[in-house]
Image: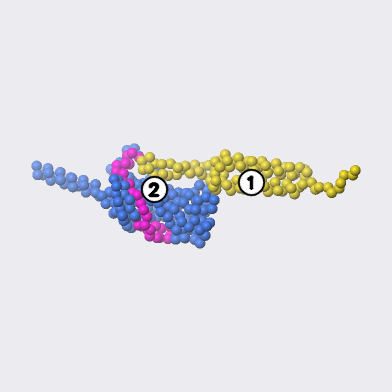
Chain colours: A yellow, B blue
Amino acid sequence: MVKALPLILRATAAVLLAGVVIWWAVGGAHRGWSMNRVPINKTDEITGIAYVEYEDRYVPGLEVLGGGAGTAVLLFGLSFLFRKPHSNLKPSP
Amino acid sequence: MIRHLVSTAAFALASAAALAAPITFDFKDPKGVNNVRFDLDAPLESMSGNANGVTGTVVFDPANPAALTGKIVVAANSLKLPNATMQDHLHSPNWIDVAKYPEITFEVTKVANAKTTGTDTTADVTGNITIKGVTKEITVPAKISYMADAMGRRQPNAKGDILVVRSEFSIKRDDFGIQAGQRGDTVGADIKLSLALAGFAPKA
């Protein structure tokens, strides 16, 4: 199990990074903070007044992308702590 | 014959007086279109939101736009941001403190430099703005559009006039104790406000 740990951590990091990038991109690649509701711009036909209506929908922002990518880097780094130590013994001739 | 002429003249005078009379417009829009947009520089992206809890009345005389008076009230808890956490901060005591100061108001005291072209009037409107319990006198540019008998086009079977008021101006955050003392490089010192409001004067 311990032998497989670095591999598991790296695989988790890769899946997490890919997942968070895809989620952020599919969610609209919003380059600001996350939104719990999305503003939809509308115009009143008679008065010409521009106004906003909100649609309840979650849009991941850059902090989600950054958090996911940071966690993936952390997991990838942790994987090196569980490397099998190199043996200093030379193989006998 | 003379009686007929007198009664016709009296009717004409009464009609002219009625047309020239100041009209009271109610700014509570049943469709909820009236809104005040606010923009504030902040890290990563500017904070942009709006408030649509608008009420108030404005008295406007199409024959004398400079005589405009009135008061607009914005419900502080109608201030909305796309991010719920940011909105909670905005409503909190450090920012607008909506629990203690439920209303943001602007009361007109003077209108200057009124210029009318067709149904549109531009003017410098002076008034007292109150935010978070602090009242300051400011002068803002405004565009006022008088739309006679336009209510029927917006609401079936409705009769009356519409008054559209637009204005854009900035206020200093510190002047109203909003995040007072917070450095300008983390949260912008100025708040840009854009008003787009319609008032209604129903006719019987």
Res A56 label: none
Q: Quadrant of the N terminus of chain B?
A: top left
Q: Is residue B150 magenta?
A: yes
Instruction: State the extent of the magenta-drawn residues as a range.
Output: B125-154
Q: Amino acid at mark 1?
A: Ala
The residue lying furthest to the left in this view is B1
User: Are the residues under badges 2 and 1 in a single subunit?
Assistant: no
Write down the residue under mark 2: B196
Q: Amino acid at mark 2?
A: Ala
Q: Is residue B153 above or below residue A73?
A: above
Q: In what element is the residue under mark 2?
A: strand
Query: For this view, does B46 lie left or right of residue B13?
Result: right
Question: Picture quarter containing residue B135?
Answer: bottom left
Can you tell which of label 2 and label 1 is closer to the viewer? 1
* Subunit ID for the residue under disc 1: A
Res A69 label: 1
Q: Residue at x 63, y 41 (%)?
A: A19
Residue nearest the observer in this picture, B115 or B90: B115
Q: Residue at x 9, y 44 (%)?
A: B2
Q: Residue at x 75, y 49 (%)?
A: A81
Q: Quadrant of the C terminus of chain B?
A: top left
Query: For this view, does B154 lie left or right of residue B2?
Result: right
Residue B116 horizontal/vertical position (percent): 29, 49
Question: Picture quarter containing residue B149?
Answer: top left
Q: CA distance from mark 2 to mark 1?
A: 42 Å
